[in-house]
């Protein structure tokens, strides 16, 4: 097994893996659009995983090489409690070296081309940031 594998999931429990599998089988409309049209195609040659278990979390889309996560946010993420939770979660992930980018469903539905450009530009800047 590769040496980086344990860090890829940061000791996620078997329950987190089961939850991720369930989420993969029932993607939201926005997640499905982003996966099928952008991230499944390995943009700029980078592999993204869909509903990736990491520690106690499940990341919507994650590229281990770039330590980059894209989170797709529906309306619930605008609610006060969820917004506070998201900020704390993102901070914990960033302490692990993972850059978290949030994209709203609205942005995806309004303009897939713009969403794709945003994602590509973030991948390019992350690549430069990590000097890959």
Image (cartoon, helix red, strand yellow):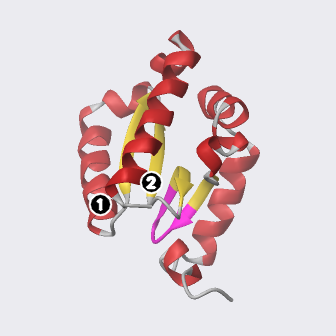
Quadrant occupied by the N terminus: bottom right
Label disc, if present, on residue 68 of the rendered structure: 2
Report crowding for label 1: few under 14, some 14 to 19, many 20 or more residues within 10 A (C-alpha).
some
**At 73% across and 33% down in the image, what residue appears?**
36
Magenta stretch encompasses residue 56: yes
Q: Position of residue 63 (x, y in %)?
A: 54, 56
Q: Residues within 10 Å of mark 2 (few under 14, many from 20)?
A: many
Element assignment for label 1: helix
Residue denoted by label 1? 94
Q: Residue at x 55, y 27 (%)?
A: 116
In the image, is residue 119 above or below residue 15? above
Start and end of the magenta stretch?
A: 53-58
Element type at mark 2: strand
- Dot label at residue 38: none
- 3 sits to left or right of 92: right
Work out whether residue 59 can be spotted.
yes
Residue drawn at (65%, 26%), measured in percent from left and top? 29
Q: Does residue 73 appear in this view?
A: no
Residue under the image location 41 percent in, 39 percent down: 122
- The first of marks 2 and 1 along the sequence is 2
Q: Which residue is nearer to you in this view: 85 or 126?
A: 126
Work out which quarter of the rendered image holds the C terminus and state it: bottom left
Determine which quarter of the picture holds residue 33.
top right
Dot in front, 2 or 1:
2
């Amino acid at each position: 097994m590769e040496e980086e594998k344990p860090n890829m999931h940061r000791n996620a429990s078997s329950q987190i893996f089961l939850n991720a599998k369930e989420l993969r089988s029932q993607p939201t409309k926005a997640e499905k659009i982003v996966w099928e049209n952008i991230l499944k195609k390995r943009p700029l040659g980078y592999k993204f995983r869909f509903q990736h278990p990491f520690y106690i979390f499940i990341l919507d889309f994650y590229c281990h090489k770039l330590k980059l996560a894209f989170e797709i946010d529906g309306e619930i993420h605008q609610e006060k409690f969820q917004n506070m939770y998201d900020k704390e979660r993102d901070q914990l992930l960033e302490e692990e070296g993972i850059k978290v980018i949030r994209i709203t469903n609205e942005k995806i539905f309004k303009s897939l081309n713009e969403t794709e450009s945003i994602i590509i530009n973030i991948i390019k800047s992350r690549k430069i940031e990590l000097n890959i």
